Image (cartoon, rainbow, N blue to C red):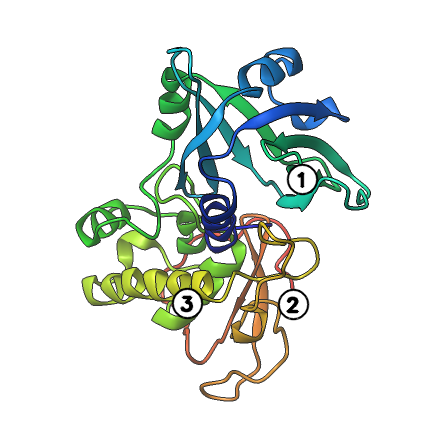
């Protein structure tokens, strides 16, 4: 599933390739990827200019303005598990599972939204509606302050892996980068946030920022579906140190990477570099390998 680095690269691509351009027409071929009324989606996008692109966590908000003085609308993009948003030549072959076409003002290019599993969503929102959606998210994981991050960990008793992935606390981390950040900070995924020392918590804060910055710089991670705005895969896959490396030697100590299930999600870690604390969160469901 695309996480913050992948979504940030799509947002950067939109700024580079589509900012200032106008949406001439919108065609929807599968309404399942549209949140709300498809008719309203089309009417509030057509004729509007892409004036600003922002991102919080895994959500992109594109500000759409008109020349007639109407209040702006916002295109909210959530890629879900397999969503792709690309700037594509209008006459390019149409890939399977392409559900939405937004023709741009020169008539030669269009924004296409493709999603094989259809878990992604596009939604047209007013400013008030957008503020409500974004207000439910925690601070962005790339921008969260040290003070907020450390304060949010206090008294938390669940698994720190699940805590990192809670979008209401810190937005943007998913399975991949939570595993990688915990490895960088040498923290076991079943550690309880409230029991992690201040020094370790600070290491985790820095690890989150470090891992995300590196992944953004390399275009994110592609396993199968993720592509940036120009259809290119991310290049961070070979930099992953623990995620999906079960049984392989740790790059630090050569012990075998292990996999367990935390909160229903696979979690990868080195049992030597990330020793299990005396008190851990309770595991639920299958233990994995």
Q: Which residue corresponds to the image point at 75% horizontal and 38% vertical from the top-left?
A: 98
x, y percent for residue 126: 43, 16
Q: Residue 214 shows which numbered tag?
A: 3
Residue 289's disc is 2
Residue 63 or residue 156, whichever sits in front: 63
Q: Are marks 1 and 2 in contact (CB under 8 Å)?
A: no
Q: Of 241 and 23, which appears nearest the observer?
A: 23
Q: Secondary structure at mark 1?
A: loop
Residue 83 appears in view: no
Q: Residue 288: name its quadrant.
A: bottom right
Residue 52, relative to residue 1: is it above or below?
above
- Frontmost residue, 197 versus 203: 203
Question: Of callouts 3 and 1, which one flags the residue occurring earlier in the amino acid sequence?
Answer: 1
The residue lying toward the viewer, choosing from 53 and 16, is 16
Q: Residue at x 52, y 29 (%)?
A: 22
Q: Describe the element under mark 2 as helix, strand or loop.
A: loop
Q: Is residue 242 left or right of residue 134?
A: right
- CA–CA distance in space, label 1 to label 2: 51 Å
From the viewer's perspective, is the residue at label 3 or at label 2 nearer?
Answer: 3
Return the disc, 3 or 2, that comes first in the chain's sequence: 3
**Alpha-carbon distance for marks 3 and 1?**
34 Å
Q: Residue at x 62, y 68 (%)?
A: 244
Q: Which residue is mark 1?
A: 108
Residue found at the very far bottom of the displayed protein: 254
Q: Secondary structure at mark 3?
A: helix
Q: Is residue 223 visible?
A: yes
**Where in the figure is residue 188, as x and y percent of width and height?**
42, 66
């Amino acid at each position: 599933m695309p996480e913050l680095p992948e979504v940030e690269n799509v947002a950067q691509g939109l700024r580079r390739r589509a900012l200032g351009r106008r949406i001439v027409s919108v065609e929807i071929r599968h309404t399942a990827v549209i949140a709300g009324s498809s008719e309203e989606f089309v009417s509030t996008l057509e004729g509007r200019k892409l004036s600003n692109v922002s991102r919080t966590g895994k959500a992109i908000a594109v500000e759409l303005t008109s020349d007639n003085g109407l209040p702006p609308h916002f295109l909210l993009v959530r890629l879900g598990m397999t969503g792709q948003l690309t700037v594509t030549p209008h006459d390019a072959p149409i890939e399977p599972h392409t559900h939405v076409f937004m023709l741009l003002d020169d008539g030669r290019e269009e924004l296409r939204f493709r999603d094989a599993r259809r878990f992604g969503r596009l939604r047209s929102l007013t400013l008030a509606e957008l503020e409500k959606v974004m207000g439910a998210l925690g601070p962005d994981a790339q921008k969260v302050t040290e003070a907020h991050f450390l304060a949010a960990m206090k008294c938390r008793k669940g698994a720190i892996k699940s805590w990192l992935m809670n979008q209401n606390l810190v937005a943007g981390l998913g399975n991949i980068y939570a595993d990688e950040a915990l490895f960088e900070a040498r923290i076991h995924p079943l550690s309880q946030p409230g029991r992690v020392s201040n020094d370790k918590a600070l290491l985790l804060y820095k690890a989150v920022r470090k891992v995300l910055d590196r992944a953004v710089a390399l275009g994110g991670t592609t396993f199968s579906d993720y592509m940036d705005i120009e259809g290119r895969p991310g290049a961070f896959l070979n930099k992953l140190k623990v995620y999906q490396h079960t049984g392989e030697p740790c790059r630090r100590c050569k012990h075998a990477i292990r996999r367990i299930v935390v909160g229903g999600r696979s979690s990868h870690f080195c049992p030597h570099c990330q020793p299990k604390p005396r008190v851990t969160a309770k595991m639920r469901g299958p233990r994995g390998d």
